Amino acid sequence: PYFIYRADRRPFGFAGVSETWLGPNGEEVDTVAIVTAPASPDLAVLHHRVPVTIAPDAFEEWLDCSSDSAEGVMAMLHGPDEGEFAWHEISTRVNHVANDDAQLVLPITDEQRAAEAPKPKRAAARKAAGGGDEGQGSLF
């Protein structure tokens, strides 16, 4: 996992859209989506698409729902510019909801990386030690 942030450390928002519509049984259904765009070359090393981000000085314009026209906001719908964001690798501890501390966004150390590396499975370790099953299969 990676901690991704604006290089200038300024806050930002994601370009999200939402809609409430009536389902087939008359129930209200709330839906949301994050708008994405192709990644800039520097972010493409992490993923080929990225969320469209909105700068704080454009929040009001993005959130203004007084017009039904999309023309006014279309200029905002592009991915971050190259160099706009920075990132660093973080601990896999972030993948567990029980972990909720400031350490989660710190760069991972070599010691943490080694401790979090996947451990070899028993069968692979046994086979490597010469205790294979000669192709007979094993339940253990």
Image (cartoon, rainbow, N blue to C red):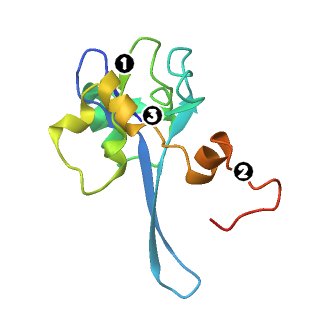
Could you tell me which secondary element the residue under label 3 belongs to? helix
The percent position of residue 29, horizontal first and vertical second, equals 46, 73
Instruction: Measure the C-alpha gap from mark 1 to mark 2.
Output: 47 Å
Q: Which residue is mark 3?
A: 73
Label 2, residues with CA under 10 Å away: few <14, some 14-19, many ≥20: some
Question: Sequence-wise, which precedes: disc 1 or disc 2?
Answer: 1
Which numbered dot is residue 24? none
Q: Residue at x 45, y 34 (%)?
A: 73
**Image point 67% across, 68% down: which residue?**
139
* Marks 3 and 2, the one that precedes in the sequence: 3
Image height of 83 relative to 90, above or below: above
Q: Nearer the viewer, residue 40 or 27?
A: 40
Q: CA distance from mark 3 to mark 2?
A: 63 Å
Q: Is residue 96 visible?
A: yes
Residue located at (44% from left, 36% from top): 117
Under circle 2, the secondary element is loop
Identify whether 128 is placed above or below 132: above
Tag 2 residue: 132
Circle 1: residue type: Ala
Q: Which amino acid lies under the numbered mark 2 shown in the image of this protein?
A: Gly
Residue 12 is situated, as x and y percent measured from the top left of the image, at: 29, 31
Of 23 and 107, which appears nearest the observer? 107
Q: Which amino acid is tagged 3?
A: Val
Q: How many marks?
A: 3
